[in-house]
Image (spheres, helix red, strand yellow):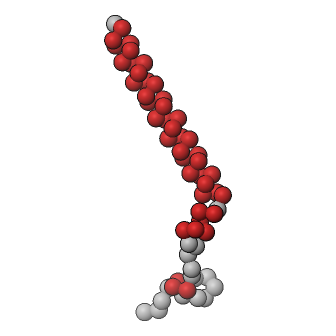
Amino acid sequence: MTPASDSDGGTAEDVRRPSVAAVARDRRVWLILAVVAGLVVCCCSAVVGTLIALSSGLLAA
């Protein structure tokens, strides 16, 4: 059985993955994290606002 190889002819074990520090320096990672955090905050605040509106409406009735 032959080992897996990439398109350059080297084996898959020779391919180095970037370290966590190198990935953390990438601005795209931080941009994606910021967008995801913003969406989570917006969704959570919308849910909390809806629950408060429903509870105040039910209490006032």
| Horizontal relation, residue 60 to residue 40: left or right | left
- In depth, the one of 1 and 10 nearer the eye is 10
Q: Quadrant of the N terminus?
A: bottom left
Q: Report the residue at 52% width, 35% height from top.
A: 42
Q: Is the residue 15 above or below the residue 32 in the image?
A: below
Residue 27, horizontal then vertical, whole percent: 66, 58
Kindly tell me whether residue 5 is visible in this rendering: no
Q: How many marks?
A: 0
Dividing the picture into quadrants, the one containing residue 17 is bottom right
Would you say residue 52 is visible in this rendering?
yes
Q: Residue furthest top?
A: 61
- Residue at figure coordinates x 58%, y 73% from the top left: 18
Is 37 situated above or below 24? above
Q: Is residue 45 left or right of residue 26?
A: left
Quadrant occupied by the C terminus: top left
Give the farthest residue toward the bottom: 1
Q: Relative to 54, does residue 47 appear above or below in the rendering?
A: below
Work out whether 42 lies above or below 12: above
- The picture places residue 8, in percent across and down from the top left corner, at 63, 85
Residue 51: x, y in percent?
A: 39, 24
- Residue at the spot x=52%, y=83% of the render? 12
